[in-house]
Amino acid sequence: MFLKKVSLILATALLAFSLTGCGGGDKKEEKKAPAADKPIKIGVTAGPHAEIMDNVKKLAEKQGLKIEVVEFNDFVTPNVALNQGELFANSMQHAPYLAATLKKEPSFKLKECFKTVIFPMAVYSTKVKKGETIPDGATVAIPNDPSNGGRALLMLDNAGLIKVKDKTNSVTALTDVVENKHNFKFQELDAAGIPRSIKDVTIACINVNYALPAGLNPLKDAIIVEGADNPYVNIFVTTEKNFNDPRIKQIEKVYRSEENKKFIIDHFKGSILSAW
């Protein structure tokens, strides 16, 4: 009888110990789990993309979604950071640029989520006024990345200044220029740095997200403005892994809300258009 009582006490103690151990394990797992309110990182380029996303951040916080806006000074790094998992998504490029990036970096697993805004590229000059003829032999600054460089060349083609091989090719290169009757001398420069070089060239093709911070408005200061029917609509991008994350739809709803649309219209005075 005594042995039975001892056995029963030991069994009870072992059971209690095992249950306590399981409980401790659950607590450890809870500590490892990510916080539900941890901000998601969204990459943007300096200028309008950053300003719009800052407004999206404010609107999203009202719905309980926290966003950390990570600002970059070039177009290349945000896609690299996104592919490496350092970002949840980015909002800084148009569809042809993403296509060119994926062609160059086939290992990148990035996908378009939704369309955001249209930033018209334009031609600016400190030497030529609107309505004046651009002189022969003029020095022309264009972005040095394939997509935006091609965009600049297509804009010049549409303006009748040059002719390119294929107007449907969004990554048209200087080697695709088939007619340059004005003998323009092209300088391929980093897109972000072109506004600083505007005085060193005759004309400069500048993306609006870099023009506005430099005090250049395409509606007021440009001598040539890209048409509204261009294919360079900006997009919100994430990885294939994050594509079906419910927070993507939540961000889309906030970004494409009437509140954000009004902000874009009022803040940029019509120089940036919503894509919805």
Image (cartoon, rainbow, N blue to C red):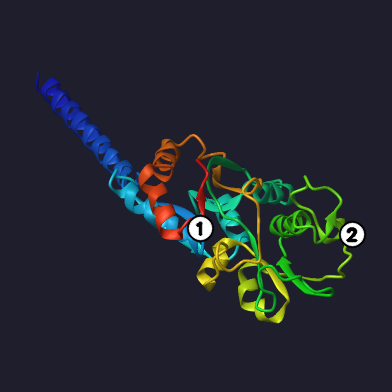
Q: Mark 2, residues whose alpha carbon is within 10 Å: few (<14), some, or many (≥20)?
A: few
Q: x%, y% of residue 4?
A: 14, 20
Can residue 67 be seen in this snapshot?
no
Q: Kindly indicate whether the residue at mark 2 contacts the one at mark 1 (C-beta within 8 angstroms).
A: no
Which quadrant of the rendered structure holds the N terminus?
top left
* Point 59% across, 53% down: residue: 93
Is 225 positioned to the left or the right of 273 in the image? right
Amino acid type at mark 2? Glu
Amino acid type at mark 1? Val
Q: Which residue is mark 1?
A: 44
Q: Is residue 163 above or below residue 102?
A: below
Asked which quadrant contains residue 194, the reply is bottom right
Asked which quadrant contains residue 132, the reply is bottom right
Q: x%, y% of residue 27?
A: 26, 42
* Point 33% across, 53% down: residue: 58
Q: Which residue is mark 2?
A: 179
